[in-house]
Amino acid sequence: MSEDHVDRLAQLSLSELRQSWTSRFKDAAPAYQSRALLAHAFAYRLQSRRGGALNATTRRRLSELATKFAADPRYAPAPPEALQPGAVLIRDWQGRRYGVTVTETGFLFDGVTYASLTKVAHAITGAKRSGPLFFRLRGDTHITQPMTTP
């Protein structure tokens, strides 16, 4: 699947995405209410067909997490010992969701690589605060498990 094809998905309306999904995959599109979410799911499905889907271990872990989150929406899995490059830290702050990607050289946020999570937290909030605490990686706050790519 080419990048051009994925780019075209972003141009389609929700109803056009649903029609394209049904035509391409021969089944009904998921009942997402968001056009953006359906476009991401569409792109993922196309890419997984081309490059392979999630491995069995990752699928099993995601299924376990889904079960735990369904039983307790406040469930907070323990973080890994060290953040691995490719991990994405997600933090909701003042009604907006922020994502920071762990890289070999630091933390990528909004097209800029920062040397520390504290510098990223400052860029987001405008105030000096602990990056690991802001991203809930330690302390008495709930922990957000970084999502890693297989």
Image (spheres, grey):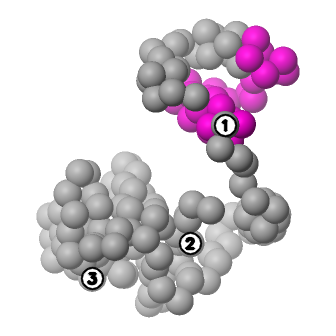
Residue 114 position by quadrant? bottom left
Q: In the image, residue 105 lies at what x, y percent?
A: 27, 73
Q: Please tell me whether the stretch drawn in magenta is mainly helix, strand or loop.
A: helix
Q: CA distance from mark 2 to mark 3?
A: 18 Å
- Looking at the rendered image, the quarter that the N terminus falls into is top right
Residue 145 position by quadrant? bottom right
Query: Does residue 74 lie above or below 70 as drawn?
Result: below
Secondary structure under tag 2 reads: loop
Looking at the rendered structure, the kind of residue marked 2 is Gln
Disc ID at residue 145: 2
Q: Is 79 or 4 nearer to us in this picture?
A: 4
Can residue 71 be seen here? The reply is: no
Looking at the rendered structure, the kind of residue marked 3 is Ser
Q: Is 112 or 47 nearer to us in this picture?
A: 47
| Image: magenta residue range | 22-49
Residue picked out by circle 1: 50
Give the mark nearer the N terminus: 1 vs 3: 1
Q: How many marks?
A: 3
Give the mark nearer the N terminus: 2 vs 3: 3
